[in-house]
Image: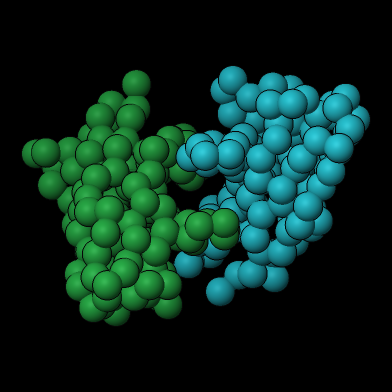
């Protein structure tokens, strides 16, 4: 059974760096055919994809946020960490991590999601 | 970036009646591997998104068969054959063919 859970601060100040951790179980992030992504959702707004990392350490970032994002993985802890620098009030959102996999001849996007963690950016 | 445009923004539906949500992409979504990575997600109030449909028309395990996906090229549709109370929420399409991954703006389904 695949599960993911996000953790991190609920409140950060403007200009600070946000560090979020996704702790997962039920799969191993050690092959190119498995990935974990981060998606955020400002209150009352749509979903926005941020970043994704694969078991072979390939990484993808949203171009609009690329300069502020870093995604890393710790396979020994079954964790994926997202850091976002220079936080601003517009970054207030619920942040989700989600699972991606390759099977057969197809990718399967975001079939499992964490519960999300609300991050508020305010002084 | 591929822009995903959903319509309508809001969809009031009578219980037991059908509902249809459109999703149009600014570019074709056929990947070089031959797959079309168009997904539909349901987000009930206060809950995480849940995938309903993957690769245009494949229903996820546990998803009621009243949900169906169709389309090709740049034009895709999610249909609910008979809306039930538990279907209330926001529905999002998402393309996974081109980087960056992009979501539609969402369609809110509510009961009339």
Q: How many marks?
A: 0
Q: Nearer the viewer, residue A96 or A24?
A: A96
Horizontal side of B29 relative to B73 (left or right) equals: left
| Residue furthest out toward the left | A76
Percent from the top left, x then y, of residue A107? 47, 44
Question: Seen in the image, is B54 located left or right of residue A5?
Answer: right
Q: Residue at x 81, y 56 (%)?
A: B8
Q: Is residue B99 visible in the rendered structure shown here?
A: yes
Instruction: Tell me how the rendering is colored.
Output: by chain
Closest to the observer, A10 or B86? A10
In-front residue for pair B7/A63: B7
Q: Is residue B8 left or right of residue B54?
A: right
**Residue B62 figure quarter:** top right
Identify the residue at image location x=57%, y=60%.
Answer: A45
Task: Kindly identify the residue that appears in the image at 23 percent across and 78 percent down.
Answer: A15
Which percent across, then down, holds residue B104?
A: 64, 59
Task: Report the quarter where the C terminus of chain B lies.
Answer: top right
Name the image quarter holding the N terminus of chain B: bottom right
Q: Residue at x 42, y 59 (%)?
A: A93
In the rendered image, residue A58, in percent from the top left (x then y), is placed at 27, 59
In the image, which lettered chain appears green?
A
Observer able to see residue B55: no
Residue farthest to the front, as pictured: A123
A112 over B8 or under it: above or below: above
- What's the colour of chain B in the image? cyan
Asked whether B48 or B53 is in front, the reply is: B48
């Amino acid at each position: 059974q695949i599960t993911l859970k996000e953790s991190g601060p609920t409140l950060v100040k403007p200009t600070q760096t946000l560090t979020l951790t996704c702790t997962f179980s039920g799969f191993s992030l050690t092959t190119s055919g498995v990935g974990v992504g981060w998606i955020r959702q400002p209150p009352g707004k749509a979903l926005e994809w941020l970043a994704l990392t694969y078991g072979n350490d390939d990484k993808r970032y949203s171009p609009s946020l690329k300069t502020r994002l870093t995604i890393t993985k710790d396979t020994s802890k079954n964790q994926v960490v997202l850091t976002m620098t220079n936080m601003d009030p517009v970054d207030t959102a619920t942040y989700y991590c989600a699972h991606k996999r390759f099977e057969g001849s197809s990718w399967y996007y975001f079939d499992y999601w964490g519960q999300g963690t609300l991050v508020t950016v305010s002084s | 970036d591929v822009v995903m445009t959903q319509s309508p923004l809001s969809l009031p539906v009578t219980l037991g009646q059908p509902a249809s949500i459109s999703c149009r992409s600014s570019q074709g979504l056929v990947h070089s591997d031959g797959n079309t990575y168009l997904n539909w997600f349901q987000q009930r109030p206060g809950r995480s998104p849940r995938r309903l449909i993957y690769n245009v028309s494949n229903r996820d395990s546990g998803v009621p068969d009243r949900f169906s996906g169709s389309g090709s090229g740049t034009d895709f549709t999610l249909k609910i054959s008979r809306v039930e109370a538990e279907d209330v929420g926001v529905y999002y399409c998402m393309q996974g063919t081109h980087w960056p991954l992009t979501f539609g703006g969402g369609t809110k389904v509510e009961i009339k």
